[in-house]
Each structure stands twice: as C-alpha cells, then as structure tokens.
Amino acid sequence: MMIAWVIGGNGLLGSALRLALLKTETTLYQQIERFHWDNESELTLKMESEVKAFAAAVNLKGSWEIYWAAGVGTMGSTEEKLALETRILSKLLDFIQAEPRLVSIKGNLAFASSAGAIYAGATNDIITENTPVAPTTAYAHEKLKQERLISDFAMSHISITVLIARISTLYGMGQAKGKQQGLLVEIARRILRNQPIQIYVPFDTIRDYITANDAAALISNALRGLKNKSGVFIKIIASEQPTTIAEIISIFKRITRRNPRIITSANKLSNLYSRRIQFRSIEVPIDEKIVKTSLLIGIAQVVAAERISFELNRG
C-alpha cells in the first residue's frame, strides 16, 4: 500500500498534488495540524510530531512518498524568511532519518523547486536539465541550497529516491493574494474590477506558464516512474509552450472582451527576472497520455473562477 504526505497541501501546488494522488491507488496522509510559518520553534515541534505520526501510518509491506510543496518564500522575500525554509527542510530530513520505519523501506521524496529562478541567468536559447544553473537572486541561491540538502540526504539512504522538480511559472485557480506572484491571476482580478494592471517587465518578455494541476500530474507521474531506481533525479516541470506578456494580454482581451488598463513601470524585482526563458525537459520520462492545458483554456478557467469569487464577495 502506498501512503503519501503532501507538505503544504493547502497551497496552490499542494492542493493540486492531493487531487492528483487521489486519482491513483494512494492513501493520503491527513496532517493533524496546519503548519504556521510565523513561529519557528512551534513549527519545528509540529513537524517532528507529524513525521512520527506519518511513520506510524506507513505499512511495512508498502512504500511511502513525501511531497514538499511548502514554504512562504518568493523572489522578493528577505534572506531571513528564505533561510527559515531551509532550516525547516533540514529539520524534516533529520526527523525522517530518526524514524527507522521510514529509512528501512522504500520511500520517495519530491521537492518543488523553481526553474525560473535557478536558470534566471542562463543564456541558452532552450533550457534543459543539462543547462548549468545560473542563479541571480537570494531566492535562487536558497533553492539550490535546499536542493543540495535533500540530495545529500538521498545519497546517504539508498532506500530513498528523490525527485527535484524545477517548476516553471506556476498558476491556477485559488492562487494566494498575499504573495508577490501570480501575474495571470492578478490580471484576471483587476480586469474584473476595472482596475489598472501594473506590468514591470517588457511586453516581449517570454515566460512558460503551467497550471498547478498539470504540474502536479507531471510531478507525481515522474516520481512513480522512478519507483525501482535509487538516487537523485532532476526534472524540469513546464508547459514547454513559451509565450510573451503581449500574447497573454491578448488572450485576456479575447476571453473577457475588455481592454485591460495597462500601466508599465519598473520596480526592484524588474531586473531579477530573465527576459526570455524557454524550457524543455529531457530527463525522467513521463506518461505520454498526460495532456497539458493550453494557456487559452488555463486563463479562461482562472477568469471564470475569479468572476465567481468576485460576484460572491460583491454580493
């Protein structure tokens, strides 16, 4: 029996991972308490308690999976907040190592990382897993530090396989409002409210947007495909359909039949993002039956969800 625990299961990616896993013969571990990132000592205690409870739920005749989709850091986060994520991840690995049941049977770990940040300074026309990393921000450097932590852990435990999922620009319905991220959702919200939209990068900036549901399906499928292998594997999770900011605005015009009120300006984050990023994954094959959502359909879904939310809040 397979049992899986999604850490960060209430977030955009975490929620999608839980839905993807429910479609398979997987038992989802139900976390006892929600993690709060504003109190490190309390968070550490809760993490230790949850690892013990998860270990107790693992069937010795089965196997286990842990998906790390947690954290509160973004490209604009302080070094202090970013370092907190790394310390908590390190604690998680220590707690897993302390549980004989988890290190004695087959286990898989999937870690959600950031392709956009890690390859931000890359000059390749198309970025693959063979492209040298080129971090340009504290966020990217911290993500690489976290990747090294989990890689070192896997190399010390041959029963555990690690998938590092370097995800392109993630979007989807229900994206958090409090973070400095989520351009597509922010555009939808402002169009529906007839508010101006601030764009901080040139219109020819290329991005690769992937829905949370598509990313979750790719990550879980890739991890399952490694079930008979040991070690650390890196995979870029992307739609592999690059698009410009200008094309995105055009799609919104088509769907909403409105002309967005665009304000172009620069802020402290403007120069942190690469102008042209195109991804192609060549590692860790996935099921060819997985169909990725087109940007047109994905944006239409976001607009529909935001319209419902807007009407409910207005009523």
Image (cartoon, grey):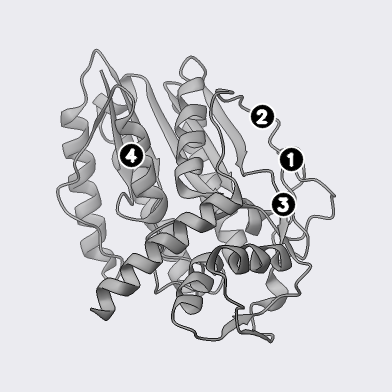
Q: Nearer the viewer, mark 4 or mark 2?
A: 4
Q: Nearer the viewer, residue 235 or 126?
A: 126
Q: Nearer the viewer, mark 1 or mark 3?
A: 3
Q: Residues within 10 Å of mark 1 (few under 14, many from 20)?
A: some
Q: Residue at horizontal 38%, vertical 45%? A: 16
Q: Look at mark 1 in the image and give the residue it sits on.
A: 128
Under mark 4, the amino acid is Leu
Q: Determine whether the residue tagged by mark 2 lies in a helix, strand or loop.
A: loop
Q: Which residue is mark 3?
A: 242
Residue 279 place in picture, x, y as percent:
72, 45
Instruction: Name the side, left or right, on which 47 lies relative to 135.
Output: left
Residue 231: % across, % down: 54, 26
- Which comes sooner in the sequence, label 1 or label 2? 1
Q: Position of residue 69 (x, y in %)?
A: 41, 49
Q: Residue furthest front?
A: 257
Q: Quadrant of residue 97?
A: top left
Q: Amino acid at mark 1?
A: Thr
Residue at the spot x=84%, y=50% of the render? 124
Q: How many marks?
A: 4
Write down the residue under mark 4.
19
* Label ID, residue 283: 2
**How many other residues sit within 10 Å of disc 3, few (<14), some (14-19) or many (≥20)?**
some
Query: Sequence-wise, which precedes: disc 4 or disc 2?
Result: 4
Callouts 3 and 4 close, C-beta under 8 Å: no
For marks 3 and 4 on the same chain, the one whose residue lies earlier in the sequence: 4
Tags 4 and 2 in contact by the CB under 8 Å rule? Answer: no
Q: Secondary structure at mark 4?
A: helix
Q: Are marks 1 and 2 in contact (CB under 8 Å)?
A: yes
Mark 3 or mark 2, earlier in chain: 3
**Amino acid identity at mark 2:** Glu
